[in-house]
Each structure stands twice: as C-alpha cells, then as structure tokens.
Image (cartoon, coloured by chain):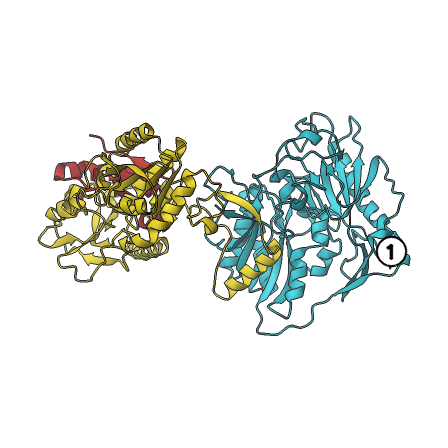
C-alpha cells in the first residue's frame, strides 16, 4: 500500500499561526500525525503540507500544486488531517480529498462533523473526530482502518457500519416499519417535545431581501464574527465555539483604536488585526462615509461574536437574536465581517 | 355508526372473468410476470345490502362491506398515438425478481385487465371507460362472497378515548392537476368535490376515494392504497392507546397557481383546527409541484399551532450529494422519507409481459435493463403504505 | 449564519470574508471577497475604503442567492 498524507503547517511541524502563509510543501515520509498512522500500518510515502491561510487565499494555485504532486505519486489512498474543529484546515482537507476523488484517487479526510470542510469534501469520505487535538489518539486508528479499506478497494457499507460521516448520497433501504407507522411515531415524538426527521430540507436558503433603496438616509450597523471586543475582553467572549454575542456602544467613536479594542478569535493569527482593529470592523472608513453622506447614519453600537467552530443551531440563534435587535432599532443595512 | 369489513378467501375468485374491450389474465403469486402501463390497482369489494361498493352518492363507511383478501385488480392501458399524455410516465409492477418487493402486489393474486386502445379514441374517453369498468369489475369479482362465510370481520369504530392523549388527524392530499391526473371523491374529481372536507376515516377505507391519477408511478396513490390505508388503519389501532384519532381531512393538492396552493393549504389547516387536532400526518400525491402544496400545508398547520409530520418521496440524483427535496419550508422539521425514486432497480428478465410488450419509450418490456424506482407503481408512495425509505450514505 | 438570519429578517446584509466558498455553503447571499483572513477589510484605510464601497454597492443591488463580488484592484 502506498499512501500520501496531507497536513497543515502546524501538524507538519513548520510553525503555528505565524506560518499560516506557508505555500504547498512536500516532505518525504511520515510527519507528525502521519507517524501515528504509520504505526497503524499506513505506508506514507510522502507528506504534503500547506499553510491554512495560504490555502484559503490562493485556493486554485495551492490545490493545483498539491494535485500535481498527488498525480505524480499515484498513491493507493490520500489521507488528510485529522483537522478536528479547525475550519480552515478542515476546508483545505475537504477540498483536497474532493478533488482527489474527482481524479479517481481514493481519499479520506478526518475532522469534526460540524467542520465546514465536511461539506467541501463532497463525494469523498470523512471520518468524524473530536473537536480538538485531544481526539488524536482516538481518531488515528479509525482513520487508518478506513484508509486501508479504501486502498484495498473494499466495498464499503453504510456510514454507521464503516464509521464515516454520511456524504449525502440518498440510498434506499427497507425500514422496520411502513412509512405510516414511522410518521405516527415521529409526530407523537414531536408532540412530546422531541423533533426528528428522516430527511432534512437540504440547505436552508433565504431569498435575498430587496436592496437598500437609499443608503444616504439609511441606518447602517456594523456586525462582526471576527471576535472583536474591548481590550481585556470584559464579557469573556470565547475564542472558539462562542457561547453568545455582545453589543458594544460606539459612543460616537471615530475609529477602532488598538488601545481600546482587540480580537480574541482563536482561528487565525490576530497580530495584524490587533495592530489596527479597523481591519476587522471598518469603523474609520464607515465614519468618513457617514460624514460624506454616502450612508445616512451609523448605528451607535457594533455586534460581535466568534465565528469559529460554532454549531449551526447556535450560530443561527445568535443571528436571529441580533437580527431582532437590529430590526427594532430601525437598521436598514448591515456590514458584516467574517474571517 | 360503525363499519365492518369482512374478509373472504381469494379461493372465491371466479374462474371466468370477462371485461368489455379488454383482455383479462389471472396471475398467481410468484409467477415471473412484468405488468406494464398500469393505471390503477383496486381490491374487490361488495356490499351485502346492495349499495354500490364505490358510491357516487350516499355514504361509504357504514354497515358492512365484503372484501376478497389477497386479490387485486390491475388495470392497464397503453394510450394510443402521438398524443400520449403520459409520456415518460411508465408504470410497472414486477411480480417476481428484484422489483417485486417494491410493490405490495407480488404476494397477491393479480387480475390483470389490459384495455384495448383503438386508434382515434380520445384519451379521456379511454380513461373514463377503463376506470369505471375496473371499479365495476372489482365489485363483480367480490359478488361470490355474498353467499360465503368470512374468514375475518374487522370492526371500525372510534370509542371515546382518554382525555390525556394527543389528538391526531390524517390530512390526505388528493390530486387536482387535471384530466388523467385526478383523484375522485365519491366519483367527483378532487377539484369539484368541495375540498377540503372532514371525512370519517371509515369512508376512506370503504371506497369513497378512487384514483384516476396517472402521474409518476412510484409517487401515485392507486385506489387500493385508500381502501387499505396503512395510515388510517394504524391510527385506528393506536386510538385510545398512544393517541386519540381525531379524523381525516381530504384536501386538494397539485394546484396550479400560487394563490390556489396557499388557499388550499390554509383551508386544510382550518379543517384540522375544527377537528381540534394537536398534530397531523400530511400525505402527498405525485412529485415536484405537489411537494410545494404539502410544504405550504405544513406551514399553515404549524402557524395554526398544529404540529405536523409530512410523508414525502425523494427525487435525488443517486450520484449527487445535494439537494434533497424539491421544496421545503423550515416548519417541515419532521419528515418521513418513502425512498429515493431515482435509484435504479437491477435488470430482470420476466418470462411474460402483460399490459403491453413495449414500454412508453419503445423498449421491449422484457429486456428493459435497469429501471428506476420511479416507474414502479406506488413504490415510494407518500401515504406510507410501504417500508421503503432512503437514508444518507 | 449571521448574514443569513439578518437577511431572513428582511435587512440586506453584506458579508465581507476571505472564505466566500464557505459563506455560500452556509447560505449568505451578498458576499464580498476580502483580501485575507487576518484582515478582511484590508491593511490600510485606502484599501479598506475600496472594500467598504464595494460592499455598499452590493447592498444597493438586486442579487441572486450566493452572489460573490470581487474587489476591483
């Protein structure tokens, strides 16, 4: 068996957030978690690595380089991760395994089920892991077993038997009960407070609302998912998996000064942001535009949370709560920043 | 008033069966037969008191009805000429092979009635003839039970049930798409039958609803699915145990304008409120457009404070990982999937083909290769008759 | 997720992010691609002004779902 392993800059031992701009790199043999996979019998010929930010910002080029190396190696299987709850690393893993499968190379990634990289993996397999690196010891043997099965070309069964996250292919099966009885069970459960479904609605889409008619008379609000808070983080916004959102008064401030604000986001290197928090919440430019009459008025508070590993239901709740406040305040348009 | 359903042995099926303008063949369970161009499936029924089994006036669900158990009449018609209204919409039943478990008919004695379709005949006239003759035949075949002893008699009556139980209604969507795509209530097309209306569940089991709807085979509800409604039977069974069966609402589906869809949905929710239902199971007929109706109905009920579970088939490319449903509203958070109709059923070569030797696309029916679930009659029906489901892999 | 919920409430929201693919997956409709994860609104006020102006234009535009705009450079 011949395997290629993909990791980010951190797990390749190249460095932390300060090395997140590292371009694709090719290393001989097993590195970092790859040694753990090797101990489980995965013969890693080559390790490919890339900085998380580099991949996100130069996706096409990075992917092209990585795929070219992959095609050169012609491995029996590509293994990516584990990326745990890291959104950018997971996204890179998912994107790479998806592209490998398109080219006929069996591929599997490993990450937390709520990592956006799971969606990016498309038709490729993803083995679930814990949300952080504590789950490494548990993840590697499962990932190795799965990679071996893929490399050997074994026919794979359903997700619960094989231990992968369902990819979304809808396959028929014969249930224990007829649909009518299942429907009554689901309805009684729902009436009892437990809502379940056999099929989700897929992606919940919202139609774009009609555009702002006249920005020069509109109240505009600044919102961020980039973890921007007053210095010292008085309300203890979490750097990952936020438990809430906060509203901070602007009191007519002209700029997000580094003396007063910082970012506590745990998903990227905040050095540049903390030098000038306007890079996350563009208060300085927004004030200029307010003075020039391009926008009517700036809402005198900004809203903040950390978009980093937050489960969908929680993030949706934050969104609804913030939206309700904005609507009540008469806000007509929102400038939102993410990472 | 209570209703009794008496079951009689299939041995009572007459040996000689003739239908005007059609060939008739009886197929026993297990025979390697494929039936094509199937319009409807009907269980033979008759009333000892002489009233019609499929009444157009009067009321079903009262007194006694006799049934021939384990027998189903399958009507087949290959509409002639270029004007085929049902292009692509093949309707197949396999009585053996890998497709057999997809329909409930392989374990039954099937009376296959293949109607002739003379050139020049109008499709709607042919359909009316086939539909009325099939219901009449179903009634004739059960006549032998009138002098026989039943194997079993079931009593359908809803006794007063405990106050603490949740009140549950069934909301049955009937197709109002147009000629050849109607379900009928007491012989009247759904659109003219003053729907939505509250019905006694026994009426539905007793021939008040019949099918003249020939859309996608897997997602349609032939007459026998109303006669044997698994949903209504299960609600009777659970009545007084886990729930209180509040009743049935018959509603229109497959409306053709956004306004008609919305008003049909809202009116159905009002009927469910009149039944004082805490929750409803909503069924669906056909696909695509009618899924919008079911979603609007779900939303209207939820907005009226009535919890919902929806029964739906999926129409997803087996090689795609998204999207899943044709239409969806966030209120539809409790859905039973009756299977993905786009999945292929492996090839099977029947020894005999009834109903028409060629499929609608011209392929010989005996050598058709893999066939999508979509083309098997009732295979992914959205009344919950069968155990098929779909899940993510 | 915030963008989607704010737009669900009927308020046009423009989402500036350097990961537009992820943004489209979670159902944002008005997306401007920022230059980098570490500084979605650019490094200097001049660059920031171009990004904000682009974002305001998107707020004023009729869009299809999942629209992503690049910044003119």
Quarter of the picture holding the N terminus of chain A: top left
Chain to which mark 1 belongs: B
In this rendering, would B334 be left or right of C54? right
All told, the count of numbered labels is: 1
- Residue B243: image quadrant is bottom right
Q: Quadrant of residue A63?
A: top left
Q: Quadrant of residue B131?
A: top right
Q: Position of residue A47 (x, y in %)?
A: 27, 38
Query: Drawn colour of chain B?
Result: cyan
- Residue A82 image point, x, y percent: 31, 47
Q: Which residue is denoted by mark 1 in the rendering?
A: B145
Q: Colour of chain C?
A: red
Q: Colour of chain A?
A: yellow
- Compared to B240, does A57 lie above or below? above
The residue lying toward the viewer, choosing from A35 and B223, is A35
Q: Residue at x 72, y 26 (%)?
A: B81
> Residue at (66%, 59%) from the top-left corner?
B232
Task: Please indicate, yes or no, whether residue C62 appears anywhere in the rendered image.
Answer: no
Q: Residues within 10 Å of mark 1 (few under 14, many from 20)?
A: many
User: In this orientation, does residue B381 appear?
Assistant: yes
* Relative image position of residue A312 (x, y in whole percent): 36, 53
Q: Where does residue A313 sit, x and y in percent of width and height? A: 37, 55
**C64 or B105, which is in the foreground?**
B105
Name the residue at 86% across, 37% down.
B20
Q: Is residue A335 above or below residue A245?
A: above
Q: Going by the image, does A157 lie left or right of C35?
A: right
């Amino acid at each position: 068996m011949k395997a290629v392993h993909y990791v980010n800059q951190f797990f390749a031992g190249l460095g932390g957030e300060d090395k997140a701009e590292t371009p694709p790199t090719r290393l001989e043999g097993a590195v970092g978690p790859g040694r753990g996979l090797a101990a489980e019998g995965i013969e890693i010929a080559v390790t490919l690595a890339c900085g998380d930010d580099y991949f996100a910002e130069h996706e096409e080029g990075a992917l092209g380089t990585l795929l070219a190396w992959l095609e050169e190696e012609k491995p029996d299987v590509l293994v990516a991760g584990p990326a745990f709850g890291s959104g950018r690393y997971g996204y890179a893993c998912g994107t790479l395994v998806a592209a490998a499968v398109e080219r006929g190379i069996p591929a599997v990634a490993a990450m937390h089920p709520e990592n956006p990289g799971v969606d990016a993996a498309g038709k490729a397999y993803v083995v679930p892991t814990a949300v952080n690196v504590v789950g490494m010891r548990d993840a590697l043997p499962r990932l190795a077993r799965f990679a071996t099965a893929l490399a050997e070309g074994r026919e794979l069964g359903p997700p619960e038997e094989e231990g992968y996250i369902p990819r979304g292919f809808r396959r028929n099966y014969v249930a224990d009960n007829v649909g009518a009885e299942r429907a009554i069970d689901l309805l009684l459960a729902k009436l009892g407070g437990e809502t379940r479904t056999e099929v989700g609605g897929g992606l919940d889409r919202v139609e774009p609302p009609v555009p702002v008619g006249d920005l020069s008379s509109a109240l505009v609000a600044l919102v961020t998912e980039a973890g921007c808070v007053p210095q010292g983080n008085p309300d203890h916004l979490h750097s990952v998996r936020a438990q809430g959102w906060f509203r901070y008064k602007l009191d007519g401030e002209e700029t997000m000064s580094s003396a007063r604000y910082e970012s506590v986001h745990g998903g990227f290197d905040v050095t540049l942001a903390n030098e000038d928090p306007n890079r996350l919440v563009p208060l300085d430019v927004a004030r200029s535009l307010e003075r020039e009459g391009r926008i009517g008025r700036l809402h005198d508070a900004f809203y903040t949370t950390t978009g980093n590993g937050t489960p969908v239901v929680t993030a949706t709740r934050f969104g609804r709560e913030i939206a309700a406040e904005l609507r009540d305040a008469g806000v007509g348009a929102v400038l939102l920043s993410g990472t | 008033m209570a209703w009794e359903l008496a079951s009689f042995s299939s041995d009572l099926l007459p040996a000689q069966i003739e239908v005007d303008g059609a060939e008739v063949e009886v197929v026993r369970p297990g025979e390697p037969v494929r039936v094509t161009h199937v319009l409807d499936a009907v269980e033979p029924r008759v009333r000892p008191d002489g009233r019609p089994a499929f009444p157009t006036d009067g009321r079903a669900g009262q007194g006694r009805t006799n049934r021939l158990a384990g027998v189903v009449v399958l009507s087949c018609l290959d509409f002639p000429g270029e004007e085929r209204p049902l292009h692509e919409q093949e309707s197949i039943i396999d009585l053996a092979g890998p497709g057999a478990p997809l329909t409930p008919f392989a374990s039954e004695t099937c009376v296959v009635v293949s109607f002739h379709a003379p050139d020049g005949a109008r499709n709607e006239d042919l359909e009316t003839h086939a539909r009325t003759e099939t219901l009449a035949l179903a009634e004739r075949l059960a006549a032998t039970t009138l002098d026989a002893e039943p194997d079993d008699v079931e009593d359908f009556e809803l006794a007063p049930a405990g106050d603490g139980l949740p009140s549950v209604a069934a909301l049955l969507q009937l197709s109002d798409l147009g000629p050849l795509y109607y379900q009928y209530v007491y012989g009247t097309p759904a659109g003219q039958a003053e729907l939505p209306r509250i019905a006694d569940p026994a009426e539905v089991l007793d021939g008040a609803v019949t099918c003249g709807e020939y859309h996608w085979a897997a997602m349609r509800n032939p007459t026998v699915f109303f006669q044997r409604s698994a949903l209504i039977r299960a609600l009777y069974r659970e009545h007084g145990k886990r729930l209180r069966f509040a009743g049935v609402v018959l509603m229109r589906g497959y409306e053709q304008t956004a306004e008609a869809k919305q008003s049909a949905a809202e009116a159905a929710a009002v009927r469910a409120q009149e039944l004082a239902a805490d929750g409803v199971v909503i069924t669906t007929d056909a696909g695509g457009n009618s899924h919008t109706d079911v979603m609007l109905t779900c939303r209207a009920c939820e907005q009226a404070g009535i919890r919902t579970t929806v029964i739906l088939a999926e129409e997803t490319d087996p090689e795609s990982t998204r999207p899943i449903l044709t239409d969806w509203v966030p209120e539809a958070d409790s859905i039973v999937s009756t299977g993905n109709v786009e999945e292929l059923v492996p090839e099977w070569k029947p020894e005999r083909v009834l109903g028409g030797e060629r499929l609608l696309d011209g392929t010989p029916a005996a050598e058709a290769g893999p066939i999508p679930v979509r083309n098997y009659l009732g295979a992914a029906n959205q009344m919950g008759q069968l155990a098929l489901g779909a899940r993510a892999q | 997720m915030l963008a989607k919920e704010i737009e669900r409430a009927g308020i046009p929201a423009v989402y500036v992010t350097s990961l537009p693919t992820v943004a489209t997956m979670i159902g944002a409709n008005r997306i401007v691609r920022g230059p980098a994860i570490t500084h979605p609104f650019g490094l200097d006020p001049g660059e920031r002004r171009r990004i904000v102006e682009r974002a305001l234009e998107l707020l004023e535009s009729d869009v299809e779902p999942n629209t992503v705009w690049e910044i003119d450079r």
